[in-house]
Image (cartoon, grey):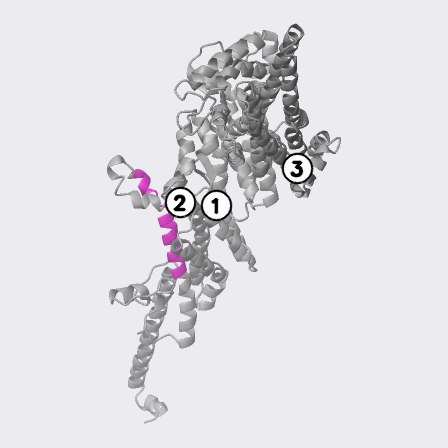
């Protein structure tokens, strides 16, 4: 029956049927609307990392079934049994809820990185149980986590705003959610990838800063700002560590994140330490702790050094921190000496020394340490350093040029005050002069007297048990004869005779046992020097001069000293041999006047010795010119250059560099760094000594062939020396200006050049040997 007819015939039944139909349609629509609203609430909750019946975590579901799934897989999905959502809406919803997955993972990373429970549980009883937890901590990760928390808080605020907007709309639509969270589709996925890389590769410290710095270079402005903010948080930690290190000299790095580390940490990481490094540590273990820290205590850990921080800047940071440690922690011995020094200053001048004033003598040690440390590094300078680092810390972006300028300025402040400590307070120039006097033989009268007093002793082999004590007698006697009361540095000098084996002999005894053949003499001239040539000097250096005069520096001084002492000993023996024979000649002349019968014997002896004096004069000529060249052209000229640098420089590191250049010039211009030249010079000096002792033995044991072989060897060595020194390889080096003077003195009459060509290019006897043959 048609509806219209039904309504006309049975109006009451038609009305009831209409009501029931409307009720069924309304009930069906309400159920669908309830599902959509439930779906909306679950969608908003999933955006904050919570899943439910409609939105599930696929990873947890697969794990419950024992099916593995990768960590980087977006595991938030719509339940597969939902049928009231269109396929297009399903794709859009799954794209939206992926933000909830990223949010949850980032929030978990932030929670793990910001977990400080290990601090509360770090007690002696729980130390082993929390060892692994403590090793995984990183202040840089914690800082990055704080930055991520800031971004997530902005995200949560956006989700809350979307919820309020959806509740106010009569018909909520997905476009509202998409429009409100649009920028986070750009931010959260790269942040999640960043977190995955950090945890997968265990990135921390400077490596983490380096990673963030690289991620800042992108073409998306929102993502670039986000990465720069994270990098800013990481730099806050770095600036705090720099402030602790460069203001107070304290290394705050309990997790190994900083690129400055203690040396023992490096040794532990590598498992086995360098033997040379261990030896240095053992040698410095009994010294002042600040010296150990200065030389071997800290190093740059390259794995934690960001790529955008240049190595030169890192070295400046390392130096500045070590310098501040030295200035803030002076040696107790220096504190007492400096307090006495300040007491001796007149009251008027004392006010001008420091602005902080002086406390009375013999205060408590802590007060003295604080006073001396404050004088060495005034509080105003420390505040200046701290303000420079604070300005860098407050900047919203990292500017490389500003950072490097601040580091250079801080380094200059530390170097200037360290220069003041070492040069002015510790009297560096006085100690340099003392080292020149004793190690470079500037006090020639003292060493001349010492060699004369010990000459007879050095004719015999040194006794291993008493050699050092035997030498102390002429050493002290020479000091008494040549020094006055004003010599205050001699007490720092001590004579040492290193231990030697049975193979070491006196050159004179070695000569007596050597046969007269040319081969044996040649071997003798090439062999090691006699035991007395191992004489060494030690110089006692107090704090803080050990920062300047390291063991390596003193060993360089010792090397030059032993070379110069052998040279002076050789010169003295040549002079003594001439004086001895002239004395004998004068004695013979007096006897000849009284005894006419022995006149012919004396004349024959003079004729026999005349060729020897020609050879001796050649030897003395070479040794004198070599000694004059080293003492005047090398040592004095380089000393004047060093003094000019000391007057002009107010930077400790510059001064160390100038002093190293000074020592390098001494060694190179003295030819000690050229093995062939130094070996020839050693052989020449030994031949000269052998010649002198052979002449003295001529009265008792005439041996002309022995002198001939010495002469032949000397001619070969001296001409080889001249040929090497005039080579083109040395002509272009830093030795060239002074070397030309030396060669000019040697070859002023072309004798050396002519002799060198004759000996090295023509096989013929030398002129001296011809004289011998005629005799």
Mark sitting earlier along the chain (3/1): 1
Q: Is residue 252 covered in magenta? A: no
Q: Disc 2 or disc 1, which is closer to the eye?
A: 1
Above/below status of 316 relative to 15: above
Can residue 49 be seen at all in this image of the molecule? yes
Q: Which mark is residue 302?
A: 1
What residue is pinned by disc 3?
725
Q: Disc 3 or disc 1, which is closer to the eye?
A: 3
Mark sitting earlier along the chain (2/3): 2
Q: Nearer the viewer, residue 95 or 6?
A: 95
| CA separation in Å, label 2 and label 3 | 61 Å
Above/below status of 372 relative to 732: above
At 61% from the left and 8% from the top, the residue drawn is 348
Residue situated furthest top in the rendering: 594
Residue situated furthest front in the rendering: 597
| CA separation in Å, label 3 and label 1 | 44 Å
The picture places residue 692, in percent across and down from the top left corner, at 57, 22
Q: Nearer the viewer, residue 625 or 337?
A: 625
Can residue 643 be seen at all in this image of the molecule? no
Quarter of the figure that contains the N terminus: bottom left
Mark 1 packing: few (<14 Cα in 10 Å), some, or many (20+)? some
At 63% from the left and 24% from the top, the residue drawn is 612
Q: Which mark is residue 406?
A: none
Q: Nearer the viewer, residue 47 or 529?
A: 529
What residue is pinned by disc 2?
138
Looking at the rendering, the stretch of residues picked out in magenta corresponds to: 101-120
At 56% from the left and 57% from the top, the residue drawn is 221
At 30% from the left and 66% from the top, the residue drawn is 68
The picture places residue 714, in percent across and down from the top left corner, at 61, 32
Name the quadrant containing residue 654: top right
Mark sitting earlier along the chain (2/1): 2
């Amino acid at each position: 029956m048609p509806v219209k007819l039904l309504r006309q015939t049975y109006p009451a039944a038609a009305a009831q049927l209409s009501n029931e139909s409307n009720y069924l349609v309304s009930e069906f629509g309400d159920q669908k609307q309830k599902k959509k609203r439930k779906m909306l609430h679950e969608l908003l909750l999933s955006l904050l990392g919570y899943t439910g019946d409609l939105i599930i975590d696929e990873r947890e579901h697969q794990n419950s079934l024992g099916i593995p799934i990768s960590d980087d897989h977006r595991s938030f999905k719509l339940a597969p049994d939902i049928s009231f959502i269109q396929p297009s809406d399903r794709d859009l919803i799954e794209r939206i809820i992926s933000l909830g997955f990223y949010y949850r993972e980032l929030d978990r990373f932030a929670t793990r990185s910001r977990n400080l429970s290990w601090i509360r549980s770090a007690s002696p009883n729980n130390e082993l149980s929390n060892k692994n937890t403590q090793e995984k901590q990183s202040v840089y990760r914690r800082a990055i986590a704080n930055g991520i928390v800031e971004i997530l808080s902005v995200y949560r605020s956006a989700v809350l705003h979307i919820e309020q907007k959806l509740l106010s709309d009569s018909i909520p639509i997905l476009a509202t959610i998409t429009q409100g969270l649009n920028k986070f589709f750009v931010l959260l996925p790269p942040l999640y990838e960043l977190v995955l890389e950090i945890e997968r590769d265990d990135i921390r410290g400077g490596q983490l800063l380096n990673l963030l710095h690289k991620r800042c270079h992108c073409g998306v402005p929102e993502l670039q700002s986000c990465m720069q903010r994270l990098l800013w948080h990481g730099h806050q930690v770095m600036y705090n560590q720099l402030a602790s290190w460069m203001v107070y000299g304290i290394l705050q790095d309990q997790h190994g994140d900083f690129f400055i580390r203690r040396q023992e940490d490096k040794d532990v990481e590598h498992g086995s330490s360098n033997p040379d490094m261990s030896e240095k540590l053992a040698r410095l273990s009994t010294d002042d702790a600040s010296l150990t820290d200065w030389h071997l205590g800290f190093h740059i850990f390259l794995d934690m050094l960001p790529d955008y921080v240049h190595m030169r800047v890192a070295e400046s940071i390392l130096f500045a921190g070590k310098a501040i440690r030295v200035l803030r922690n002076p040696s107790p011995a220096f504190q007492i000496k400096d307090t006495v020094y300040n007491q001796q200053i007149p009251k008027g001048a004392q006010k001008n020394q420091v602005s902080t004033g002086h406390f009375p003598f013999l205060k408590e040690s802590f007060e003295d340490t604080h006073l001396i440390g404050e004088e060495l590094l005034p509080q105003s300078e420390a505040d200046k350093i701290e303000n420079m680092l604070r300005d860098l810390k407050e900047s919203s972006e990292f500017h490389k040029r500003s950072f490097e300028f601040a580091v250079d300025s801080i380094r200059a402040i530390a170097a200037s005050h360290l220069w003041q400590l070492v040069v002015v307070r510790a009297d560096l120039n006085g100690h340099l002069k003392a080292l020149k006097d004793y190690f470079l033989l500037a006090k020639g009268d003292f060493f001349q007297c010492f060699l004369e007093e010990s000459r007879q002793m050095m004719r015999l082999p040194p006794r291993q048990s008493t050699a050092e004590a035997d030498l102390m007698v002429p050493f002290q006697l020479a000091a008494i004869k040549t020094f006055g009361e004003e010599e205050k540095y001699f007490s720092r000098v001590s004579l040492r005779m290193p231990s030697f084996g049975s193979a070491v002999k006196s050159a004179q005894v070695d000569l007596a046992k050597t046969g007269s053949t040319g081969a044996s003499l040649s071997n003798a001239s090439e062999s090691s020097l006699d035991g007395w040539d191992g004489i060494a000097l030690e110089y006692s250096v107090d704090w803080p001069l050990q920062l300047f005069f390291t063991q390596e520096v003193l060993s360089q001084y010792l090397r030059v000293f032993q070379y110069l002492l052998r040279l002076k000993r050789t010169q003295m023996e040549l002079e003594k041999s001439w004086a001895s024979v002239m004395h004998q000649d004068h004695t013979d002349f007096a006897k000849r006047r009284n005894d006419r019968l022995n006149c012919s014997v004396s004349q024959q002896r003079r004729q026999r010795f005349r060729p020897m004096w020609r050879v001796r004069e050649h030897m003395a000529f070479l040794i004198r010119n070599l000694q004059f060249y080293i003492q005047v052209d090398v040592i004095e000229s380089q000393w004047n250059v060093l003094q000019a640098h000391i007057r002009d420089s107010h930077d400790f590191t510059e001064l160390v560099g100038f002093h190293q250049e000074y020592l390098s010039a001494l060694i190179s211009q003295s030819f000690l760094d050229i093995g062939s030249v130094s070996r020839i010079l050693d052989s020449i000096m030994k031949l000269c000594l052998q010649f002198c002792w052979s002449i003295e033995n001529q009265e008792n044991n005439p041996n002309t062939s022995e002198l001939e072989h010495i002469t032949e060897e000397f001619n070969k060595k001296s001409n080889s020396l001249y040929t090497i020194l005039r080579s083109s390889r040395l002509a272009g080096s830093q030795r060239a200006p002074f070397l030309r003077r030396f060669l000019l003195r040697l070859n002023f009459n072309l004798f050396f050049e002519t002799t060198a060509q004759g000996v090295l290019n023509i096989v013929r006897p030398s002129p001296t040997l011809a004289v011998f043959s005629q005799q």
